[in-house]
Image (spheres, rainbow, N blue to C red):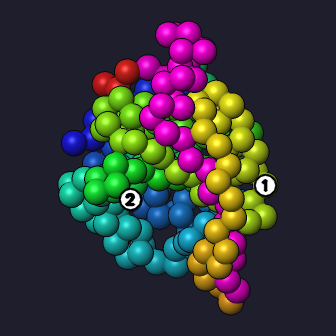
Amino acid sequence: MFPETLTTERLRLERACREAVDVDEFHRIRSSDDGIESVAEYLPWEPHDTRAETVALLDRIEREWETGEVARYFVRPNESEPNAGELAGVAKLDVDRSRRAGSLGIWLRKRFWGRGYSGERAGALLDLAFDRLDLAVVEVIHQDGNDRSRQAIERYLETYGGSYDGVLRNWRAHGDVVVDAHRYTITAEEYADAAVEAGEYGRSISNAD
């Protein structure tokens, strides 16, 4: 259902699975990578305490891929970038076929922040959602207070279309508190209109492999 790899100008997105990563290295990144506390601050997970948690996560990732629920990709800079080939983070597209809807997500290791990778990843997954999976709308949600994500989302919405929908009150429990979130959506029509305005080759994404 999902392509094994996607490419952009600077990135290679490859199917997230055990065969594509060293499990011990992935555990180290998810548990004690430099800046991992900052990475997880606004995310619905905490750094892993045990290797078993990381193995269980990879098992779930593989199951969700096989059932067509979630496409997760390891994000790696290509040969033109610093740290080429290293695991920079994980991107995902949740798919709800009954609503023809998707939801984008990403986390990046702190050392890869500030490079604009979130926008390139968004372009590749939007192309997958609209051009290959024929979805009607894609949402992006960030927790209240996560200004870094807000800024990244606002930047790529300028390129790919879409709009801010509003606040999701009491979105989820986060530790001992209940937090709000902010929702943005892009429709297939808005995405197509943005492509026309940009010109056929105005986007940084390329076809999926």
110 with respect to 28 (left or right): right
Please indicate, yes or no, whether residue 172 appears anywhere in the rendered image. yes
Labelled disc at residue 147: 1
Q: Earlier in the sequence, mark 2 or mark 1?
A: 2
Is 200 drawn above or below residue 24 in the view shown? above
Q: Pointer 1: residues within 10 angstroms few (<14), some, or many (20+)?
A: few
Alpha carbon of mark 2 to alpha carbon of mark 1: how far?
A: 31 Å
Viewer-closest of 127 and 190: 190
Name the residue that disc number 2 marks. Answer: 23
**Magenta highlight on residue 179:** yes
Residue 36, horizontal then vertical, whole percent: 65, 63
Viewer-closest of 3 and 134: 134
Give the magenta part as a residue range: 177-206
Circle 2: element type:
helix
Which quadrant of the figure has residue 153? top right
Please indicate, yes or no, whether residue 55 appears anywhere in the rendered image. no
The C terminus - image quarter: top left
Viewer-closest of 152 and 21: 152
**Magenta highlight on residue 113:** no
Q: Pointer 2: residues within 10 angstroms few (<14), some, or many (20+)?
A: some
Is 202 drawn above or below residue 34 in the view shown? above
Circle 1: element type:
helix
**Badge 2 amino acid:** Val
Residue 123, horizontal then vertical, whole percent: 52, 32
